[in-house]
Image (spheres, helix red, strand yellow):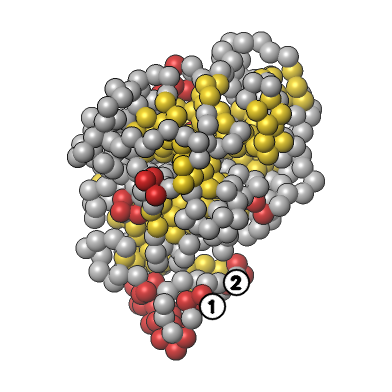
């Protein structure tokens, strides 16, 4: 850690450097920005130079260009700490999440990894030293195939961390291996539990995971403060043959989904909470789960059925056709709450995304459009997160540019409760690599992933030519109003 005097010197140097580097990475400065600097009221919440200052490997600190949200004007650079698959990813992706305690979680590779201090240090415990609670023995992967597993991870509203790993190269069993990893609320960061669960099919694929808000009371699956629902990317999107569910975070059972053309009884679902705690800034699953936890209990799947109607899973783990209180369906499969009680939905079509925001449970909506048709031939990956405490919405997009390479962007919408217009656009990385998702491709970036820390700092996956595998960056330069910063911890 840096001492107080040294730390202040580092921050002064970085502020001078940020001003010196402004405009050196393409574009021109706007006259309006010169009169009102984009970095006014901003500060480093973490010391960039406390990371490795060599960018031939990770971690290191790199300047990401920032500029106007909807023009080519660039304003300067914002430093981000950059990490690679050593911090939890694999050849093709990172699976990122945050906790209300400020942990950065990553389950892009074989096991969960985490950082308690914005990436300064990382922990990863092999399952052989995890506590095993009433489960079968650990079955390692084939020697030489280590690091090819992948998983999912998210924090439940009560503070528990639920997580699932998939191992496609088993040593002896001949079928995929399915391991639950569970971290109880309030336990030491390294105090994990694990359990082996065999999947019923020989091929599973990357999992998506979400909390079903409880209390859960099911005759078939048990009771608990929540249920953890896991679906396979392959099972759910290609075949729709169900998922896995658990009420203890360790032992999972097969869980059936309704057919897309089913006609179920209708349940009106209250999507208009009066207030929510800060934990609701960290419960959003990856968007490909295509569902979100409901504050009044259960889990909501917008646009699940072929006719466009929604599905709802109640606290007894029974399925319904869900509607809002006015009998409507939600406008997108991709929705989530945050602690402000805002319900965010995003619609993607062609090279246009639309952010929709409702303060009344989906009865009425405000919209903001992101049109990339002038610079993109297609949108390849995207993800969003919001933080109600910081009044912050961040949209991450990876698009195929007309010039050839893929470009990674992040829009920050600060004070979205006042205006949905983004404040700035950040170019993540160099934007000089053409990669895509899917097995068989030489250069892969399989999906977007991101999170927002309690201090308002984003961390987002991207890919450029500086590394053969996807990277992720942790934002260091934030508005002073987000405080308190981590400076006290650094001192």
Judge left or right: residue 235 versus residue 479.
Answer: left
Q: Nearer the viewer, mark 2 or mark 1?
A: 1
Q: Residue at x 34, y 57 (%)?
A: 83
| Residue pointed to by mark 1 | 488
Q: How far across and how far down the image is residue 387, in percent?
A: 61, 53
Choose between 248 and 360: the one closer to the eye.
248
Residue 316 appears in the figure: yes
| Circle 2: element type | loop
- Could you give the CA–CA distance between mark 2 and mark 1, rounded to whole angstroms? 9 Å
Q: Which residue is mark 2?
A: 484
User: Alpha-carbon neighbours of circle 2 within 10 Å: few (<14), some, or many (≥20)?
Assistant: few
Residue 223 occupies quadrant: top right
| Residue at 65% over, 28% down | 222
Q: Position of residue 97 (x, y in %)?
A: 49, 49
Front residue of 443/114: it is 114
Point out residue 10 in the picture as x, y percentages from the top left corner: 40, 82
Q: 90 or 62, which is in the foreground?
A: 90
Q: Are marks 2 and 1 in contact (CB under 8 Å)?
A: yes
Find residue 430 and report its horizontal and vertical position in percent. Answer: 29, 55
């Amino acid at each position: 850690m840096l001492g107080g005097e040294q730390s202040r010197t580092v921050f002064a140097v970085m502020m001078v450097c940020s001003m010196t580097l402004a405009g050196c990475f393409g574009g021109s400065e706007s006259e309006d920005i010169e009169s009102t600097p984009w970095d006014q009221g901003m500060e480093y919440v973490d010391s960039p130079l406390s990371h490795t200052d060599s960018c031939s490997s990770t971690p290191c600190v790199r300047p990401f260009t920032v500029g106007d949200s909807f023009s080519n004007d660039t304003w300067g650079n914002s430093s981000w700490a950059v990490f690679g698959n050593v911090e939890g990813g694999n050849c093709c992706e990172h699976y990122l999440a945050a906790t209300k305690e400020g942990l950065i979680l990553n389950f892009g590779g074989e096991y969960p990894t985490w950082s308690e201090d914005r990436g300064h240090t990382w922990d990863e415990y092999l399952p052989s030293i995890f506590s095993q609670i009433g489960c079968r023995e650990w079955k390692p992967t084939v020697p030489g195939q280590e690091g090819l597993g992948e998983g999912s991870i998210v924090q439940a509203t009560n503070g528990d961390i639920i997580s699932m790993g998939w191992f496609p190269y088993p040593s002896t069993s001949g079928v995929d291996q399915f391991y639950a990893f569970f971290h109880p609320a309030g336990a030491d960061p390294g105090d994990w539990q694990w359990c082996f669960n065999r999947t019923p099919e020989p091929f599973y694929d990357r999992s998506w995971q979400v909390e079903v808000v409880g209390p859960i009371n099911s005759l078939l699956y048990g009771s608990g403060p929540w249920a953890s629902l896991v679906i396979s990317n392959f099972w759910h999107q290609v075949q729709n043959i169900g998922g896995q569910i658990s009420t203890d975070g360790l032992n999972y059972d097969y869980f059936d989904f309704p057919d897309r053309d089913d006609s179920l009884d209708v349940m009106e679902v209250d999507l208009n909470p009066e207030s929510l705690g800060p934990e609701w800034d960290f419960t959003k699953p990856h968007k490909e789960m295509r569902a979100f936890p409901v504050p009044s209990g259960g889990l909501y799947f917008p646009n699940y059925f072929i006719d466009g109607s929604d599905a709802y899973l109640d606290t007894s783990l029974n399925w319904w056709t869900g509607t809002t209180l006015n009998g409507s369906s939600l406008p997108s499969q991709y929705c989530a709450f945050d602690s402000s009680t805002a319900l965010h939905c995003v619609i993607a079509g062609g090279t246009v995304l639309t952010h929709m925001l409702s303060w009344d449970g989906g009865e009425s909506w405000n919209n903001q459009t992101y049109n990339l048709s002038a610079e993109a031939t297609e949108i390849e990956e995207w993800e969003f997160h919001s933080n109600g405490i910081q009044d912050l919405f961040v949209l991450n997009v990876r698009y195929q540019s007309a010039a050839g390479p893929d470009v990674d962007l992040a829009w920050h919408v600060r004070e979205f409760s006042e205006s949905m217009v983004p404040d700035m656009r950040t170019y993540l990385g160099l934007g000089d690599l053409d990669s895509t998702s899917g097995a068989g491709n030489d250069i892969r970036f399989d999906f977007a992933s991101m999170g927002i820390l309690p201090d308002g700092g984003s961390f987002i996956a991207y890919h450029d030519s500086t590394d053969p595998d996807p990277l992720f960056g942790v934002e260091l330069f934030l508005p002073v109003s987000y405080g308190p910063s981590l400076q006290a911890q650094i001192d």
